[in-house]
C-alpha cells in the first residue's frame, strides 16, 4: 500500500486527467473529489452552487477530505479551492503527498473558456476572474512543497514529472 497522492492546483491546470493517468500507471485508486460530490448530491457542481451556495459546497468538500484521509493507496484530484480550507490542507498533508499543478492564466483561460461547468468562472471577463482568484489564492498554492508546471506539457509528461519527483516505482 502507498500513501495517498493529492493532486491540487487552480481550475484548468489538469488535475483530474493527470491524477487519473498517474493512478493508472501506479496501479492506485483514482478519486475525483468534484465527481464524488456531484454523484452524492445528484447535482452538478454548478447546480450545487446555485441551489445551496458556495459554503455548502465547501462543507461537502471538508466532509469528503475527512473521509478520504482514512484510506490509502489513492490518487486524489481535489477541486481547485479545496486547499483554501486550512483544515483540508492540514488533513491532506498529514495523510499524503500534495502536488500542486500550475499554468499561466492565459493557458488556464484557453482550457476553460468553452466550458460552463465552473460557477466561479461564469459570465463575462473570465480572464479577469482567473487573474483575480489566482492572486487571492497565490499563497495557498505557493505553500505546497511540490509544484509542477503544466503550461506546455502533455498529460504523460506531467505524470512522468510527478513520478520522478516522488521517486516512485511503477
Ligand atoms: C473550484 C474548482 C472546481 C470546483 C468548484 C470550485 C474552485 O474544481 O471544485 O467549481 O474553487 O477553484 P476544478 O478545479 O476541478 O475545476
Image (spheres, grey):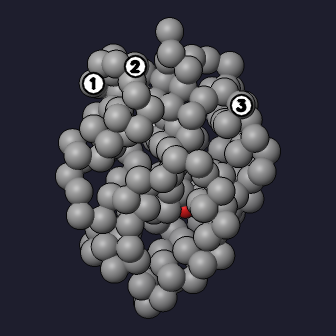
Q: Choose top left, top right, bottom left or bottom right for residue 41.
A: top right
Residue picked out by circle 3: 94
User: Residue 86, can we see it?
Assistant: yes
Q: Residue furthest right?
A: 87
Q: Residue at x 54, y 26 (%)?
A: 4
The residue carrying mark 1 is 25
Q: Is residue 1 left or right of residue 115?
A: right
Whichever of callouts 3 and 2 sits on the residue coming sooner in the sequence is 2
Q: Residue at x 48, y 78 (%)?
A: 130
Q: Residue furthest top?
A: 1
Q: Residues within 10 Å of mark 3 (few under 14, many from 20)?
A: few
Quarter of the picture holding the C terminus? top left
Q: Badge 2 is on which residue?
A: 28
Q: Residue shown at 41%/38% (left/top)?
A: 165
Residue 101's spot in the image, x, y percent?
Answer: 44, 54
Mark 2 element type? loop
Amino acid at each position: 500500500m502507498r500513501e495517498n497522492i493529492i493532486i491540487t492546483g487552480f481550475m484548468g491546470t489538469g488535475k483530474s486527467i493527470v491524477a487519473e493517468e498517474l493512478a493508472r500507471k501506479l496501479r492506485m485508486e483514482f478519486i475525483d473529489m468534484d465527481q464524488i460530490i456531484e454523484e452524492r448530491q445528484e447535482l452538478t457542481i454548478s447546480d450545487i452552487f446555485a441551489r445551496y451556495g458556495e459554503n455548502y459546497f465547501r462543507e461537502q468538500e471538508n466532509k469528503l477530505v475527512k473521509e478520504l484521509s482514512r484510506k490509502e493507496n489513492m490518487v486524489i484530484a481535489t477541486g481547485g479551492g479545496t486547499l483554501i480550507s486550512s483544515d483540508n490542507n492540514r488533513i491532506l498533508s498529514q495523510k499524503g503527498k500534495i502536488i500542486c499543478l500550475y499554468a499561466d492564466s492565459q493557458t488556464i483561460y484557453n482550457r476553460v473558456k468553452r466550458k460552463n461547468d465552473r460557477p466561479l468562472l461564469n459570465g463575462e471577463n473570465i480572464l479577469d476572474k482567473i487573474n483575480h482568484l489566482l492572486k487571492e489564492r497565490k499563497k495557498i498554492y505557493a505553500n505546497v512543497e511540490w509544484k509542477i508546471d503544466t503550461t506546455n506539457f502533455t498529460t504523460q509528461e506531467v505524470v512522468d514529472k510527478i513520478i520522478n519527483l516522488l521517486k516512485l516505482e511503477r
